[in-house]
Amino acid sequence: MNEPLRYLVVATADAAGGAAARSARFGDKTLLWVPADQRLGRASRTAPGLLLVTQVGRSFQDDYPDVTPLLDHGRHLVISSADRPRRRSNHHWRIETLRPNTTVVDTPAAAAARVDPVVADLVGDVSTTSYQNDLTWLANLPTRHSLSTTFTQAMDFASDRMVALGYQVARMPITVGAGHSADLIGDRAGVGSSRQLVIVTAHLDSINIAGGPAAAAPGADDNGSGSAGVLELGRLLSTRSWQHDVRLILFGGEEEGLFGSKQYVAALPPAERARVRAVLNMDMIGTKNTATPGVLLEGAPVSSGQMADLSTAAATYTGLKVETSLNPFASDHVPFINAGIPAVLTIEGADSANGHIHSANDTLNFIDWSLATEILRMNIAALAGWLEPAAVHRRPQPAGSVVSWGPGRIDAFAVGTDSALHHKAFDGAWQDFESLGGVVLG
Protein backbone atom coordinates (compact mmCIF):
# COMPACT_ATOMS: atom_id res chain seq x y z
CA MET A 1 0.00 0.00 0.00
CA ASN A 2 1.38 3.44 -0.91
CA GLU A 3 2.52 5.70 1.91
CA PRO A 4 0.85 9.15 2.11
CA LEU A 5 2.83 11.99 0.62
CA ARG A 6 3.23 15.74 0.74
CA TYR A 7 3.03 17.68 -2.55
CA LEU A 8 3.59 21.21 -3.81
CA VAL A 9 3.02 22.87 -7.19
CA VAL A 10 5.71 25.40 -8.13
CA ALA A 11 6.85 27.29 -11.19
CA THR A 12 9.16 25.04 -13.20
CA ALA A 13 11.88 27.69 -12.98
CA ASP A 14 11.81 27.30 -9.16
CA ALA A 15 11.68 23.50 -9.10
CA ALA A 16 15.44 23.11 -8.62
CA GLY A 17 14.96 24.15 -5.01
CA GLY A 18 13.20 20.84 -4.38
CA ALA A 19 16.05 18.70 -5.65
CA ALA A 20 15.48 16.04 -2.98
CA ALA A 21 11.82 15.68 -3.96
CA ARG A 22 10.28 13.61 -6.70
CA SER A 23 8.89 15.68 -9.54
CA ALA A 24 6.66 15.75 -12.61
CA ARG A 25 6.87 18.66 -15.04
CA PHE A 26 3.83 20.12 -16.79
CA GLY A 27 5.16 22.93 -18.97
CA ASP A 28 5.70 26.01 -16.81
CA LYS A 29 4.50 24.18 -13.66
CA THR A 30 6.15 21.35 -11.74
CA LEU A 31 4.60 19.15 -9.06
CA LEU A 32 7.01 18.12 -6.28
CA TRP A 33 6.35 15.46 -3.66
CA VAL A 34 8.02 13.78 -0.69
CA PRO A 35 6.89 11.36 2.05
CA ALA A 36 4.23 12.98 4.22
CA ASP A 37 6.52 13.18 7.26
CA GLN A 38 9.04 15.37 5.40
CA ARG A 39 8.92 19.13 4.95
CA LEU A 40 8.30 20.65 1.52
CA GLY A 41 7.10 24.20 2.09
CA ARG A 42 4.38 26.09 3.90
CA ALA A 43 1.97 25.83 0.97
CA SER A 44 2.33 22.04 0.63
CA ARG A 45 -0.58 19.68 1.17
CA THR A 46 -0.96 15.94 1.78
CA ALA A 47 -2.57 13.21 -0.33
CA PRO A 48 -2.69 9.41 -0.16
CA GLY A 49 -1.24 9.21 -3.70
CA LEU A 50 -1.08 10.99 -7.06
CA LEU A 51 -2.83 10.02 -10.29
CA LEU A 52 -2.30 11.39 -13.80
CA VAL A 53 -5.42 11.98 -15.90
CA THR A 54 -5.14 12.45 -19.66
CA GLN A 55 -8.37 13.69 -21.22
CA VAL A 56 -9.94 14.86 -24.47
CA GLY A 57 -11.31 18.34 -24.00
CA ARG A 58 -12.90 18.46 -20.53
CA SER A 59 -14.24 14.91 -20.68
CA PHE A 60 -12.98 13.75 -17.26
CA GLN A 61 -13.96 17.01 -15.57
CA ASP A 62 -17.39 16.83 -17.17
CA ASP A 63 -17.84 13.25 -15.91
CA TYR A 64 -16.54 14.08 -12.40
CA PRO A 65 -17.25 17.78 -11.69
CA ASP A 66 -16.80 17.27 -7.95
CA VAL A 67 -13.15 16.18 -8.30
CA THR A 68 -10.81 19.13 -7.76
CA PRO A 69 -7.51 18.65 -9.64
CA LEU A 70 -4.33 19.16 -7.64
CA LEU A 71 -2.78 20.44 -10.89
CA ASP A 72 -4.63 21.40 -14.06
CA HIS A 73 -2.68 21.61 -17.31
CA GLY A 74 -5.54 21.20 -19.74
CA ARG A 75 -5.17 17.83 -21.42
CA HIS A 76 -3.36 16.59 -18.31
CA LEU A 77 -4.58 16.70 -14.72
CA VAL A 78 -3.19 15.42 -11.43
CA ILE A 79 -5.76 14.20 -8.91
CA SER A 80 -5.55 12.59 -5.48
CA SER A 81 -5.80 8.81 -5.41
CA ALA A 82 -8.62 9.39 -2.91
CA ASP A 83 -10.67 10.67 -5.86
CA ARG A 84 -9.99 7.68 -8.12
CA PRO A 85 -13.26 6.78 -9.88
CA ARG A 86 -14.35 3.19 -10.29
CA ARG A 87 -13.78 3.34 -14.04
CA ARG A 88 -10.07 3.37 -14.90
CA SER A 89 -10.52 4.84 -18.39
CA ASN A 90 -12.76 5.15 -21.43
CA HIS A 91 -12.38 6.46 -24.98
CA HIS A 92 -12.07 10.05 -23.79
CA TRP A 93 -10.00 9.95 -20.60
CA ARG A 94 -7.38 7.72 -18.99
CA ILE A 95 -6.05 7.40 -15.41
CA GLU A 96 -2.64 6.07 -14.38
CA THR A 97 -0.21 6.45 -11.50
CA LEU A 98 1.89 9.61 -11.79
CA ARG A 99 5.47 8.50 -12.39
CA PRO A 100 8.20 10.33 -10.47
CA ASN A 101 10.93 12.40 -12.13
CA THR A 102 9.17 12.65 -15.47
CA THR A 103 8.23 15.37 -17.95
CA VAL A 104 4.57 15.06 -18.89
CA VAL A 105 4.53 18.29 -20.91
CA ASP A 106 7.67 20.08 -22.08
CA THR A 107 8.20 23.55 -23.51
CA PRO A 108 11.05 23.08 -25.98
CA ALA A 109 13.30 26.03 -26.67
CA ALA A 110 13.50 25.42 -30.41
CA ALA A 111 15.59 27.95 -32.29
CA ALA A 112 14.47 29.24 -35.66
CA ALA A 113 16.35 27.71 -38.57
CA ARG A 114 17.53 29.54 -41.66
CA VAL A 115 14.52 30.32 -43.84
CA ASP A 116 14.40 28.09 -46.92
CA PRO A 117 12.96 30.11 -49.85
CA VAL A 118 11.26 27.02 -51.29
CA VAL A 119 9.57 26.22 -47.96
CA ALA A 120 8.75 29.88 -47.35
CA ASP A 121 6.93 30.02 -50.70
CA LEU A 122 4.91 26.96 -49.71
CA VAL A 123 4.12 28.37 -46.27
CA GLY A 124 3.02 31.60 -47.90
CA ASP A 125 0.61 29.68 -50.12
CA VAL A 126 -1.49 28.42 -47.17
CA SER A 127 -4.96 29.74 -47.98
CA THR A 128 -7.24 30.62 -45.08
CA THR A 129 -10.06 31.11 -47.62
CA SER A 130 -9.67 27.63 -49.11
CA TYR A 131 -9.48 26.09 -45.64
CA GLN A 132 -12.48 28.09 -44.44
CA ASN A 133 -14.59 26.98 -47.40
CA ASP A 134 -13.90 23.28 -46.76
CA LEU A 135 -14.46 23.49 -43.01
CA THR A 136 -17.67 25.48 -43.47
CA TRP A 137 -19.06 22.84 -45.84
CA LEU A 138 -18.24 20.02 -43.41
CA ALA A 139 -19.59 21.80 -40.32
CA ASN A 140 -22.86 22.66 -42.05
CA LEU A 141 -23.81 18.99 -42.23
CA PRO A 142 -26.19 18.03 -39.40
CA THR A 143 -23.78 15.33 -38.19
CA ARG A 144 -20.80 13.32 -39.35
CA HIS A 145 -21.46 10.38 -37.04
CA SER A 146 -19.58 7.44 -38.52
CA LEU A 147 -22.74 5.43 -39.22
CA SER A 148 -24.79 8.27 -40.69
CA THR A 149 -25.66 8.99 -44.31
CA THR A 150 -24.22 12.49 -43.87
CA PHE A 151 -20.84 10.98 -42.94
CA THR A 152 -20.94 9.36 -46.38
CA GLN A 153 -21.76 12.76 -47.89
CA ALA A 154 -18.75 14.25 -46.12
CA MET A 155 -16.56 11.46 -47.47
CA ASP A 156 -17.93 12.01 -50.99
CA PHE A 157 -17.08 15.71 -50.70
CA ALA A 158 -13.53 15.00 -49.51
CA SER A 159 -13.06 12.31 -52.15
CA ASP A 160 -14.06 14.70 -54.93
CA ARG A 161 -11.60 17.28 -53.59
CA MET A 162 -8.75 14.76 -53.53
CA VAL A 163 -9.51 13.48 -57.03
CA ALA A 164 -9.56 17.05 -58.37
CA LEU A 165 -6.10 17.55 -56.85
CA GLY A 166 -4.73 14.49 -58.65
CA TYR A 167 -4.72 11.93 -55.83
CA GLN A 168 -5.51 8.26 -56.40
CA VAL A 169 -8.45 7.73 -54.06
CA ALA A 170 -9.78 4.58 -52.41
CA ARG A 171 -12.14 3.74 -49.55
CA MET A 172 -11.30 1.13 -46.95
CA PRO A 173 -14.36 -0.46 -45.32
CA ILE A 174 -14.22 -0.60 -41.51
CA THR A 175 -16.48 -1.81 -38.75
CA VAL A 176 -17.61 0.50 -35.97
CA GLY A 177 -19.12 -1.73 -33.32
CA ALA A 178 -21.88 -3.62 -35.13
CA GLY A 179 -22.05 -1.01 -37.91
CA HIS A 180 -20.08 -0.29 -41.07
CA SER A 181 -18.18 2.82 -42.07
CA ALA A 182 -15.03 3.64 -44.04
CA ASP A 183 -11.65 5.36 -44.19
CA LEU A 184 -10.83 7.60 -47.18
CA ILE A 185 -7.30 7.27 -48.58
CA GLY A 186 -5.66 9.51 -51.19
CA ASP A 187 -2.23 8.69 -52.64
CA ARG A 188 0.23 10.76 -54.66
CA ALA A 189 3.50 9.18 -55.76
CA GLY A 190 6.86 10.85 -55.41
CA VAL A 191 9.50 10.90 -58.11
CA GLY A 192 12.51 9.63 -56.15
CA SER A 193 14.21 6.34 -56.89
CA SER A 194 13.99 5.12 -53.27
CA ARG A 195 10.72 6.43 -51.93
CA GLN A 196 9.55 6.62 -48.35
CA LEU A 197 5.98 7.41 -47.30
CA VAL A 198 4.62 10.44 -45.42
CA ILE A 199 1.02 10.19 -44.14
CA VAL A 200 -1.26 13.12 -43.25
CA THR A 201 -4.33 12.18 -41.22
CA ALA A 202 -7.41 13.39 -39.36
CA HIS A 203 -10.70 11.83 -38.33
CA LEU A 204 -13.69 12.89 -40.38
CA ASP A 205 -16.40 11.78 -37.96
CA SER A 206 -18.12 13.83 -35.26
CA ILE A 207 -20.21 12.91 -32.25
CA ASN A 208 -22.79 14.25 -29.80
CA ILE A 209 -22.23 12.18 -26.67
CA ALA A 210 -25.24 13.37 -24.69
CA GLY A 211 -27.66 13.45 -27.62
CA GLY A 212 -26.76 10.16 -29.29
CA PRO A 213 -26.14 9.21 -32.94
CA ALA A 214 -29.11 11.12 -34.38
CA ALA A 215 -28.40 14.39 -32.55
CA ALA A 216 -26.79 17.45 -34.12
CA ALA A 217 -23.02 17.10 -34.20
CA PRO A 218 -21.49 19.81 -36.43
CA GLY A 219 -18.01 18.93 -35.18
CA ALA A 220 -16.48 22.18 -36.41
CA ASP A 221 -13.36 21.93 -34.25
CA ASP A 222 -13.56 18.20 -33.49
CA ASN A 223 -12.69 17.40 -36.11
CA GLY A 224 -13.80 19.41 -39.09
CA SER A 225 -10.77 21.59 -38.38
CA GLY A 226 -8.37 18.68 -38.83
CA SER A 227 -10.22 17.21 -41.81
CA ALA A 228 -10.23 20.52 -43.67
CA GLY A 229 -6.57 20.76 -42.71
CA VAL A 230 -5.83 17.50 -44.51
CA LEU A 231 -7.53 18.85 -47.64
CA GLU A 232 -5.62 22.16 -47.48
CA LEU A 233 -2.27 20.45 -46.94
CA GLY A 234 -3.15 18.02 -49.72
CA ARG A 235 -3.86 20.98 -52.01
CA LEU A 236 -0.51 22.58 -51.21
CA LEU A 237 1.41 19.33 -51.67
CA SER A 238 -0.22 18.77 -55.06
CA THR A 239 1.36 21.99 -56.38
CA ARG A 240 4.92 20.62 -56.10
CA SER A 241 6.87 17.48 -56.99
CA TRP A 242 8.35 15.51 -54.10
CA GLN A 243 10.95 12.80 -53.73
CA HIS A 244 8.71 10.69 -51.49
CA ASP A 245 5.11 9.46 -51.57
CA VAL A 246 2.36 11.34 -49.74
CA ARG A 247 -0.82 9.73 -48.44
CA LEU A 248 -3.89 11.56 -47.12
CA ILE A 249 -6.23 9.63 -44.80
CA LEU A 250 -9.56 10.68 -43.30
CA PHE A 251 -10.58 8.10 -40.71
CA GLY A 252 -14.02 6.98 -39.62
CA GLY A 253 -14.93 5.62 -36.19
CA GLU A 254 -12.43 7.69 -34.20
CA GLU A 255 -14.94 8.99 -31.69
CA GLU A 256 -16.14 5.48 -30.81
CA GLY A 257 -12.61 4.22 -30.09
CA LEU A 258 -10.14 4.79 -32.96
CA PHE A 259 -11.77 2.08 -35.09
CA GLY A 260 -10.64 3.49 -38.43
CA SER A 261 -6.99 4.03 -37.58
CA LYS A 262 -6.67 0.78 -35.62
CA GLN A 263 -8.01 -1.25 -38.54
CA TYR A 264 -5.92 0.68 -41.06
CA VAL A 265 -2.67 0.07 -39.17
CA ALA A 266 -3.55 -3.59 -38.57
CA ALA A 267 -3.99 -4.09 -42.33
CA LEU A 268 -0.79 -2.24 -43.28
CA PRO A 269 1.75 -4.72 -44.75
CA PRO A 270 5.13 -4.90 -42.97
CA ALA A 271 6.97 -3.52 -46.00
CA GLU A 272 4.64 -0.53 -46.08
CA ARG A 273 5.06 0.08 -42.35
CA ALA A 274 8.83 0.04 -42.75
CA ARG A 275 8.88 2.86 -45.30
CA VAL A 276 6.71 5.32 -43.31
CA ARG A 277 8.88 8.33 -42.57
CA ALA A 278 6.29 10.27 -40.59
CA VAL A 279 2.59 10.39 -39.73
CA LEU A 280 1.15 13.85 -39.11
CA ASN A 281 -2.23 13.71 -37.36
CA MET A 282 -4.45 16.77 -36.87
CA ASP A 283 -7.24 16.71 -34.28
CA MET A 284 -8.77 20.00 -33.09
CA ILE A 285 -6.59 22.74 -34.54
CA GLY A 286 -9.15 25.55 -34.73
CA THR A 287 -9.96 27.00 -31.29
CA LYS A 288 -7.73 29.50 -29.52
CA ASN A 289 -7.92 28.81 -25.80
CA THR A 290 -5.09 31.04 -24.56
CA ALA A 291 -3.97 34.63 -25.16
CA THR A 292 -0.88 33.42 -27.03
CA PRO A 293 -1.68 31.08 -29.94
CA GLY A 294 -0.39 27.66 -28.96
CA VAL A 295 -0.09 24.09 -30.18
CA LEU A 296 0.63 20.81 -28.42
CA LEU A 297 2.77 18.24 -30.23
CA GLU A 298 2.02 14.82 -28.81
CA GLY A 299 4.00 11.73 -29.74
CA ALA A 300 6.37 9.15 -28.29
CA PRO A 301 10.12 8.46 -28.30
CA VAL A 302 9.72 6.83 -31.74
CA SER A 303 8.51 10.18 -33.11
CA SER A 304 10.79 12.54 -31.16
CA GLY A 305 12.67 13.50 -34.33
CA GLN A 306 9.45 14.48 -36.10
CA MET A 307 8.36 16.49 -33.05
CA ALA A 308 11.68 18.36 -33.11
CA ASP A 309 11.17 19.12 -36.82
CA LEU A 310 7.71 20.54 -36.11
CA SER A 311 9.05 22.64 -33.22
CA THR A 312 11.73 24.10 -35.47
CA ALA A 313 9.18 24.76 -38.21
CA ALA A 314 6.97 26.59 -35.72
CA ALA A 315 9.87 28.75 -34.54
CA THR A 316 10.97 29.51 -38.10
CA TYR A 317 7.69 30.18 -39.90
CA THR A 318 5.05 30.95 -37.22
CA GLY A 319 4.44 32.72 -33.94
CA LEU A 320 3.07 29.62 -32.19
CA LYS A 321 3.95 28.72 -28.61
CA VAL A 322 4.82 25.01 -28.70
CA GLU A 323 4.43 22.42 -25.97
CA THR A 324 5.32 18.74 -26.35
CA SER A 325 4.20 15.54 -24.67
CA LEU A 326 5.35 11.92 -24.92
CA ASN A 327 2.07 10.72 -23.41
CA PRO A 328 -0.03 9.76 -26.47
CA PHE A 329 -3.76 9.26 -26.00
CA ALA A 330 -7.14 9.13 -27.70
CA SER A 331 -6.45 10.17 -31.28
CA ASP A 332 -5.41 8.49 -34.51
CA HIS A 333 -1.66 8.85 -33.95
CA VAL A 334 -1.85 6.23 -31.16
CA PRO A 335 -2.31 3.05 -33.27
CA PHE A 336 0.67 4.07 -35.42
CA ILE A 337 2.84 4.66 -32.35
CA ASN A 338 1.76 1.32 -30.87
CA ALA A 339 3.00 -0.31 -34.10
CA GLY A 340 6.38 1.43 -33.82
CA ILE A 341 5.60 3.98 -36.56
CA PRO A 342 6.66 7.61 -35.94
CA ALA A 343 3.45 9.62 -35.55
CA VAL A 344 2.69 13.04 -34.07
CA LEU A 345 -0.57 14.70 -33.05
CA THR A 346 -0.90 18.44 -33.58
CA ILE A 347 -3.69 19.84 -31.41
CA GLU A 348 -4.61 23.33 -30.22
CA GLY A 349 -3.01 24.42 -26.97
CA ALA A 350 -5.01 24.13 -23.72
CA ASP A 351 -7.71 22.15 -25.49
CA SER A 352 -9.49 21.38 -22.20
CA ALA A 353 -10.66 24.99 -22.15
CA ASN A 354 -12.79 24.13 -25.18
CA GLY A 355 -16.05 22.97 -23.63
CA HIS A 356 -18.01 22.82 -26.89
CA ILE A 357 -16.75 19.57 -28.43
CA HIS A 358 -18.82 16.38 -28.54
CA SER A 359 -22.02 18.44 -28.54
CA ALA A 360 -24.31 20.51 -30.76
CA ASN A 361 -22.30 23.58 -29.69
CA ASP A 362 -19.12 22.65 -31.61
CA THR A 363 -19.87 25.21 -34.31
CA LEU A 364 -18.00 27.60 -36.59
CA ASN A 365 -18.63 30.41 -34.08
CA PHE A 366 -15.69 29.17 -32.01
CA ILE A 367 -13.16 28.67 -34.81
CA ASP A 368 -10.15 30.97 -34.81
CA TRP A 369 -9.06 31.03 -38.45
CA SER A 370 -5.70 32.65 -37.73
CA LEU A 371 -4.71 29.92 -35.23
CA ALA A 372 -5.66 27.15 -37.64
CA THR A 373 -3.69 28.87 -40.41
CA GLU A 374 -0.61 29.13 -38.19
CA ILE A 375 -0.77 25.42 -37.33
CA LEU A 376 -1.13 24.57 -41.03
CA ARG A 377 1.93 26.73 -41.78
CA MET A 378 3.96 24.82 -39.21
CA ASN A 379 2.72 21.51 -40.59
CA ILE A 380 3.40 22.26 -44.26
CA ALA A 381 6.94 23.42 -43.43
CA ALA A 382 7.67 20.14 -41.65
CA LEU A 383 6.04 18.10 -44.42
CA ALA A 384 8.26 19.79 -47.01
CA GLY A 385 11.31 18.64 -45.07
CA TRP A 386 10.08 15.06 -44.80
CA LEU A 387 8.93 14.79 -48.42
CA GLU A 388 11.96 16.61 -49.90
CA PRO A 389 11.34 18.78 -52.98
CA ALA A 390 12.14 16.99 -56.22
CA ALA A 391 13.86 20.09 -57.58
CA VAL A 392 14.71 23.48 -56.20
CA HIS A 393 12.73 26.18 -57.96
CA ARG A 394 15.22 28.96 -58.59
CA ARG A 395 14.46 32.43 -59.80
CA PRO A 396 15.59 32.92 -63.39
CA GLN A 397 18.64 35.03 -64.11
CA PRO A 398 17.76 38.35 -65.70
CA ALA A 399 17.86 38.47 -69.50
CA GLY A 400 17.35 42.23 -69.43
CA SER A 401 16.72 45.08 -67.06
CA VAL A 402 13.26 43.81 -65.91
CA VAL A 403 12.19 40.21 -65.25
CA SER A 404 8.72 38.95 -64.29
CA TRP A 405 9.14 35.48 -62.79
CA GLY A 406 5.64 34.93 -61.45
CA PRO A 407 2.21 36.55 -61.06
CA GLY A 408 2.63 39.92 -59.38
CA ARG A 409 6.41 39.47 -58.97
CA ILE A 410 8.95 41.63 -60.79
CA ASP A 411 12.73 42.07 -60.53
CA ALA A 412 14.29 45.26 -61.88
CA PHE A 413 18.04 45.68 -62.36
CA ALA A 414 19.96 48.92 -62.89
CA VAL A 415 23.53 50.14 -62.92
CA GLY A 416 24.14 52.71 -60.20
CA THR A 417 26.39 55.74 -60.23
CA ASP A 418 28.96 53.53 -58.49
CA SER A 419 28.98 51.26 -61.59
CA ALA A 420 27.66 48.36 -59.46
CA LEU A 421 24.55 46.32 -60.29
CA HIS A 422 21.52 47.16 -58.16
CA HIS A 423 18.30 45.16 -57.75
CA LYS A 424 14.75 46.22 -56.83
CA ALA A 425 11.89 43.72 -56.33
CA PHE A 426 8.10 43.98 -56.49
CA ASP A 427 6.00 41.30 -54.77
CA GLY A 428 2.87 43.32 -54.13
CA ALA A 429 4.89 46.29 -52.92
CA TRP A 430 8.19 47.70 -54.11
CA GLN A 431 11.18 46.77 -51.94
CA ASP A 432 14.22 49.00 -51.41
CA PHE A 433 17.13 48.79 -53.85
CA GLU A 434 19.89 46.38 -52.84
CA SER A 435 23.41 46.43 -54.24
CA LEU A 436 24.59 43.23 -55.92
CA GLY A 437 28.11 44.61 -56.07
CA GLY A 438 30.62 44.23 -58.85
CA VAL A 439 31.48 46.67 -61.60
CA VAL A 440 29.48 46.84 -64.81
CA LEU A 441 31.66 47.78 -67.76
CA GLY A 442 30.17 49.81 -70.58
Image (cartoon, grey):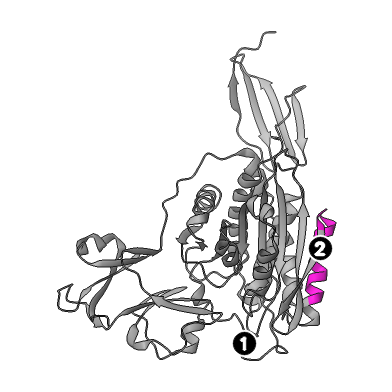
Q: Is residue 105 magenta?
A: no
Q: In the rendered structure, are the residues bearing label 1 and label 2 in contact, judged by CB atoms less than 8 Å apart?
A: no
Q: x, y percentage for residue 394?
A: 70, 32
Q: x, y percentage for residue 381?
A: 61, 49
Up-down relation of residue 97 to residue 302 (above or below): below
Q: x, y percentage for residue 86?
A: 44, 90
Is 118 situated left or right of 148 in this image?
left
Q: x, y percentage for residue 270?
A: 66, 56
Mark 1 or mark 2: name the one nearer the start of the chain. 2
Say which quarter of the image contains residue 121: top right
Up-down relation of residue 142 to residue 293 (above or below): below
Classify the position of the N terminus by image quarter: bottom left
Please identify, in this view, whether the residue under mark 1 or under mark 2 is nearer the observer: 2
Is 409 situated left or right of 256 in this image?
right
**For mark 1, does the 10 Å Cα neighbourhood hold few (<14), some (14 to 19), or many (20 or more) residues?**
some
Is 122 situated left or right of 168 in this image?
left
Q: Which residues are magenta?
A: 152-168
- Residue shown at 30% from the left, 80% from the top: 49
Q: Is residue 161 magenta?
A: yes
Q: Where does label 1 land, which residue?
A: 209
Of all residues, the one furthest to the front in this rendering is 270
- Residue shown at 71% from the left, 63% from the top: 249
Secondary structure under the numbered disc 1 in the rendered image: loop
Q: Where does label 2 land, which residue?
A: 170
Q: Is residue 123 among the parts visible in the rendering? A: yes
